[in-house]
Amino acid sequence: MDRLSGFSRSRRRCAAGEAFRRAGIHNMNLPENTNNTSTLAENIATVCHNMNGQLAIILGFAGLAGAGDPVAVARRFASIETAARNIHLMVQTMAAMGRGTYTPRPLLRQPLQQLWADAHPSLAALCARANVSLSMSPAPICLLRMDRSELRQVLEVLVDNAARATNDLPSSADRRGVVSVSAVQVHSHTLHIEIQDRGVGMDADAISRFMLGLRPQQVRGHGLGLVFVRQAVRRHGGNVAITSQPGGGTTIRINLPIA
């Protein structure tokens, strides 16, 4: 009986792992190896991390919702509604994964400026909640083949990480209270998006784990969300590069093909 019970649990774990793999890498964007309990626990933790980022946006805007002119108030409530809808979508996606019925959304040709406009309110809220400033340069005029919601979440994860890492260092240090987001078109076929902070940084081991698709261990600020970022960017035909050192800040560059 125990052997049959163990076999049944093993089959359920494998079935769950297969459902995650079939689901692709949309909002959940989980590691490829999901056939054991510890990896499934990390998958759940990654989902919770993504949801927590959306809740941080809701909480950040909720604290400011009634302040300022009516136009600003309306924008904040719109951002709160968007973040709540994102959480709802994540829950629906996870349920579909469990049933094995999930299909990732297609990548469509869309202007980068629209992604910038979508992301700016939530990025500013994440930085404000961490008591740091956001510097976001204008987007170059170009088209990307993308799931705009997914790439917005990539930016939210990276800016949230950068803001929390920055908040760990003295605010009096030069530029350490600023998270910078920029984009530049390279030649005619590649876009570089950079998220830069002057926070606590990562050591070589943490960067290596990320490049292998593993969760960085014991990294303040940068952590779980990097697994999501790596896989989401890969689905868009791009890659991620990290430059960092402990105490010297982190620069994460996303390289994406221009449509």
Image (tube, grey):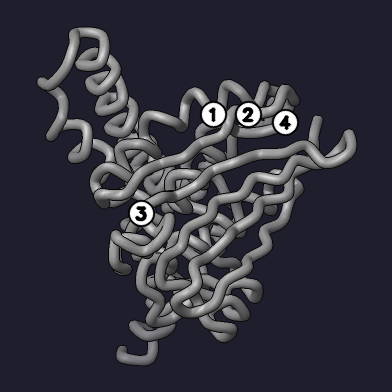
Say which of marks 2 and 1 sits in front.
Answer: 2
Tell me the residue at 29%/60% (across/down): 171
Disc 2 to disc 3: CB gap under 8 Å:
no
Q: Is residue 61 above or below residue 243?
A: above
Residue labelled with disc 3: 177
Residues packed near mark 4 inside 10 Å, few (<14), some (14 to 19) or many (20 plus): many
Q: Quadrant for residue 116, please give it.
A: top right
Residue 7 in picture, x, y percent from top left: 43, 83
Q: Which mark is residue 139?
A: 2
Visible in this render: residue 91?
A: yes
Residue type beneath disc 2 = Ala
- For disc 4, the marked residue is 144
From the viewer's side, name the closer residue of 37 and 148. 148
Q: Residue tagged by mark 1?
A: 116
Q: Left or right of 234: which side holds 247?
A: left
* 4 or 2: tag closer to the N-terminus: 2
The reply to whether callout 2 and callout 1 are in contact (CB within 8 Å) is yes
Q: Nearer the viewer, residue 228 or 35?
A: 228
Horizontally, residue 110 falls left or right of residue 18, namely right
Q: Is residue 198 left or right of residue 244?
A: left
